[in-house]
Image (cartoon, grey):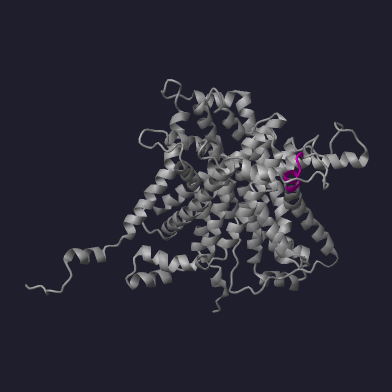
Amino acid sequence: MTIAADAPPAAMVARRNFDFSWPVFGTLGLVLVVLVLLPMFWLAVYAFSGKDGGFTLDNFVQLATEPNLRKPFLIALGMALAVGALSCLIATPLAWLCARTDLPGQRLVRAAVMASFVTPPFLGAIAWEILAAPNSGLINQAYRAIFGLQMFEDPLLDIYTMQGLVFAIACYTFPYVFTLVANALDRVPSDLEDASAILGGGWWRTLRKVTLPMALPAMLAGTLIAILQALTMFGSPAILAMPAGFHVITTKIWSLFQYPPNPGLAAAAAWPLLIFTVVLLWGQRRILGRRGFESAGGKSGEARIVKLGRWKWLAVLFAFTVVLFTIILPCLALLKAALTRKVSDPIALSTLTLHNFNFVLFEFSATRLAMYNTFVLGLATATIGTALALVVAYLANRNAIKGANYLGMLATAPVAIPGIVLGVGLFLSYTQPGLMLYGTLWILLVAFLTIELPAGYQQLSAALKGVHVDLEEASRMLGATRLQTLARINAPLLRTSVVAAWCFIFIGTIRELSATILLTTAETKLVSVIIYDLHESGDLGAISVLGLLLLVVTFVIVWLANRLPLLGGAQRKRTA
């Protein structure tokens, strides 16, 4: 047999026909396993290890029997449930007003909710500290001035209470509920509401019997997210609860790493949170599984808009009140503190100063490095995390490889672990010989990827379920590999969801403090840690400048991400 002289070598043909998708998918799967399981492995090792390194249950016995360890968990549980309930009570009517009524200024309300979501909760807690501290709070100062009260007489508001903590956290968790409920209400079929109206149901009966039941899954899912956010939060409780004289479980775990450190007990404290989350998720699935909430039929037409009539201005007042307490007052408080030397100084031309801006931007040596570290990590985490989440969501939803559903479970597992406890696990993992990443930005990148992966995965997984497999099968039939199909078919179709996932991960990275507080060193500090350090010294002016700077840059980056042609901004202008 002869071979043509110009025939390609066999090795070249083999390389050309080789599907590189499987090695790439396998590598990413291994990365996911390492990201999620390695810190959890070390948390388990330390939770079941005694001081001599042997197996023991003493950490769990101590956790269950000592009141000073049991009480913070119960307080955190009650606080988280209260935050979830308050977030739902705020967000659900506001979402209905924006999605299904003729409320004036709906776009402004939605923009304000997004601004509340972007604001780091620990920064919001500091803003409310400026507003409602019992003695120096601006609201209490104004209240005493109006009624002629003395400095230390009963304040109108006291943020250093359980009620104050619940309120301050709910201000920055209700956007989760609002977003999910508003999106669900946008998709409620108007045909069902029209049928209710034809049968004699008024708008109130239609709302109770048709609209809200259709949005109930989104309400439960959003409330669950708010509960988990509150339960695993460190920043706001550290700023408001500890000065009030009580701990929640996250601040108690942080205290266990102060001198003398007790990592075994801290690791053991993570497991009740994990169990509670699993039970909560199981309960949500059981509740939703008893009743179908999907609509049958084709296109439902445009949303049925309720005319508010005489209730319009009451609705406007409610929406304005929510925006006032979540965005306007906190931002004004930060701006006031940034422009005066003392928070208690009255606003006048004689008291206005740029001293705090000059200090933060030109004199404070940590600012430039912290801003660089923060946004480099934010951009890197958002880009790598979105790509990883897209691949994992594709594998899990399309069952592309054997055991892909387990990758989906791993991708959502970090949501059940408090950031500060995950930070402990990462510290223990990456201070081992051969994996020494502590003291570098790499350990923070690993931490942020692990923490933010569930948000990206859930966003893209839900979007992939709406993409029919026919286009993928056609691509495969024409010779494309799975990796090429994902890049050329799925990714363009999911452009909007990919941008949303990127923004979610970026914002989550900027807001993160729980894990960061344990993993940074002098050379790797981020803006969030600098703000927390300055809070310890009471420099509210510098904190306000850093916080406002962080918000402005974050808004600019998110705005650009939604408008770059490669990310889909220009694509919206195309016509069918």
Asked if residue 455 shows in the view, the reply is yes
Residue located at (72% from left, 31% from top): 244
Q: Is residue 142 above or below residue 5?
A: above
Examine the image and state in which quarter residue 81 appears: top right
Residue located at (67% from left, 31% from top): 242
**Is 433 in front, or is 462?**
433
Left or right, 353 with respect to 271, comes to right
**Is 184 in front, or is 38?**
38
Q: Which residues are magenta?
A: 335-342
**Helix, strand or loop: magenta stretch:** helix
Residue located at (22% from left, 64% from top): 14
Residue 251, horizontal then vertical, whole percent: 61, 33
Asked if residue 292 shows in the view, the reply is no
Residue 410, horizontal then vertical, whole percent: 45, 47
**Is 135 in front, or is 275?**
135
**Is 318 in front, or is 242?**
242
Residue 340, horizontal then vertical, whole percent: 76, 43
* The N terminus lies in quadrant: bottom left
Residue 261, horizontal then vertical, whole percent: 52, 25
Examine the image and state in which quarter residue 370 appears: top right
Q: Is residue 14 above or below residue 456?
A: below
Left or right, 141 with respect to 304, comes to right
Q: Is residue 476 magenta?
A: no
